[in-house]
Image: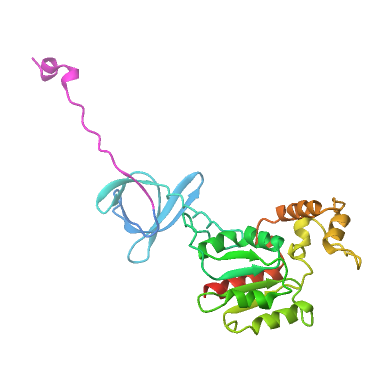
Amino acid sequence: MSYYDQWGPAEIAAPKKSVQPEVPIELGMVLEDSQSGWVGAVTRVEKSGGMHVFSLEDRRGRTRSFELGYGFLLEGRPVRLAPPAPRRTPAPAKRTASGSIAVDGARARVARASRIWVEGKHDAELVEKVWGDDLRLEGIVVEPLHGVDDLAAAVADFQPGPQRRLGILVDHLVEGSKESRIAERALSVPGAAGHVLVVGHPYVDVWQAIRPQTLGIPAWPTVPRGLDWKTGILRAFGWPHETPEDLGLGWQRLLGAVHTYADLEPSLLGRVEEVIDFLTA
């Protein structure tokens, strides 16, 4: 009886197939072509005529081209060369509305004694919308003053010092203005030197710190003398403007157009950043 008759076809073990690992090719990888014995480092990989080809440069600087696939040794082991692994483009860093890199999972810091003072509610809401994430991370609170006419007395009551700094943002702070004289008096309060910073923007109202392009207009409307500026702006836009509620709703429409620092004028951006740096130094 033959071996085949004794065991039958199902009894004969099939020869094991060698499974060669698939390895993505990389520049600088040292390979050996098992057929020719050529050994070299990968210096080029490209797709040509629907095929991936690569070059191996030997130690004498000679090169030879090959096609990806079987027939190569990597560190003495047979491998199947695959196309290069796709490069992963790192996801862009998340940024806050102010342009700072966002810190994922960061908790708000316990509020510092230092404060940012702004003239009114609208100023506070605008600063919060753009810089709120940064301020919470630093533990800085923004407080509206509802006017700066008695700023020196407010600074004296605050009792500024090394651990109680004040950064104050004032509307229409230009040379020779009433606001500039108010700022000078506030900075002369005992204890203010080095612990109080007063900065400002040139606009009549913080509304004007929103870039006109953000609102889809070429420029802010000109308001006639003697007419309340905010009322005049809303009237020029054709929006309701007769009651305090109208003014509040109008501001919310304007604020809704602001999403990032790029929607604001640089003259405001620089001043707010200056105040934050002062309080966190």
Q: Estimate the x, y position of residue 51 in percent, counting from the top left.
A: 47, 45
Residue displayed at 39% across by 55% down: 26
Height in image: 245 above or below 168? Answer: above
> Which picture quadrant has residue 275?
bottom right
Taking depth in this image into account, of 249 and 11 the one nearest to the observer is: 249
Taking depth in this image into account, of 228 and 280 the one nearest to the observer is: 228
What range is drawn magenta here?
Answer: 1-25
Height in image: 153 above or below 128? Answer: below
- What colour scheme has been applied to the protein in the rendered image? rainbow
Q: Is residue 67 left or right of residue 13?
A: right
Q: Estimate the x, y position of residue 116 in percent, counting from the top left.
A: 61, 69
Q: Is residue 9 left or right of residue 168?
A: left
Taking depth in this image into account, of 259 and 152 the one nearest to the observer is: 152
**Residue 219 visible to the viewer:** no
Q: Residue furthest left?
A: 1
Q: Estimate the x, y position of residue 159 in percent, counting from the top left.
A: 57, 77
Residue displayed at 52% across by 69% down: 113
Q: Estimate the x, y position of residue 162 in percent, counting from the top left.
A: 51, 79
Question: How many numbered markers are drawn?
Answer: 0
Height in image: 183 above or below 227? Answer: below
Residue displayed at 67% across by 78% down: 152
Residue displayed at 50% across by 59% down: 108
Residue 181: in magenta span = no
**Residue 62 visible to the viewer:** yes
Q: What is the quadrant of the N terminus in the image?
A: top left
